[in-house]
Amino acid sequence: MEAVMNSIPVKLSASAIAEVKRLLEKDGAARPLRVGVKGGGCSGMTYVMEFDEAKEGDQHFEIDGIHLVMNKSHELYLLGMEVDFGSGLNDRGFVFRNPNASSTCGCGTSFSV
């Protein structure tokens, strides 16, 4: 495994950290959390957030004991992004706040730059 980087391009809010830890505990797996992007969605790119194995070329980060991996080329799209978790009736789930997005779709899971 690569060394953990000091500069973390993505932030997780306290509620996102709590939810990721809950999911890790429920899953029982020790796989890192992958944060990234892929083509698709109604605005051109979609966020990726899943438990996955580290791959060659990944950057490694740690936030409050959570091991994150991200393809180095995705940093351009995600630098400064904050992931939050809403637990209310109208905003349940992970929310992505990306300062690099020039537009986002109504559901907030896809964007364009």
Image (cartoon, rainbow, N blue to C red):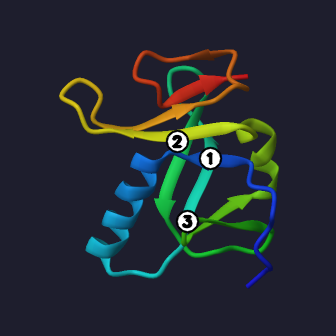
Q: Which residue is mark 1?
A: 11
Q: Quadrant of residue 26?
A: bottom left
**Image position, residue 71 (x, y; %):** 73, 58
**Image position, residue 55 (x, y; %):** 69, 73
Q: Looking at the picture, tell me which residue is in the foreground, 88 or 72.
A: 88
Q: Which residue is mark 3?
A: 64
The first of marks 3 and 1 along the sequence is 1
* Distance from Cα at disc 2 to Cα at disc 3: 14 Å
Tell me the tag on residue 83.
2
Contact (CB < 8 A) between labels 1 and 2? Answer: yes
Tell me the tag on residue 104.
none
Residue visible at 71% across and 40% down in the picture: 78
- Judged from the image, the secondary structure of the residue bearing numbered disc 2 is strand
**Image position, residue 92 (x, y; %):** 27, 35
- Judged from the image, the secondary structure of the residue bearing numbered disc 1 is strand
Contact (CB < 8 A) between labels 3 and 1? Answer: no
Q: Residue furthest bottom?
A: 1
Quarter occupied by the C terminus = top right
Q: Quadrant of residue 65?
A: bottom right
Residue 38 located left or right of residue 17: right
Instruction: Tell us which disc is closer to us: 3 or 1.
Output: 3
Q: Residue furthest left?
A: 89
Amino acid carrying mark 2 in the image: Val
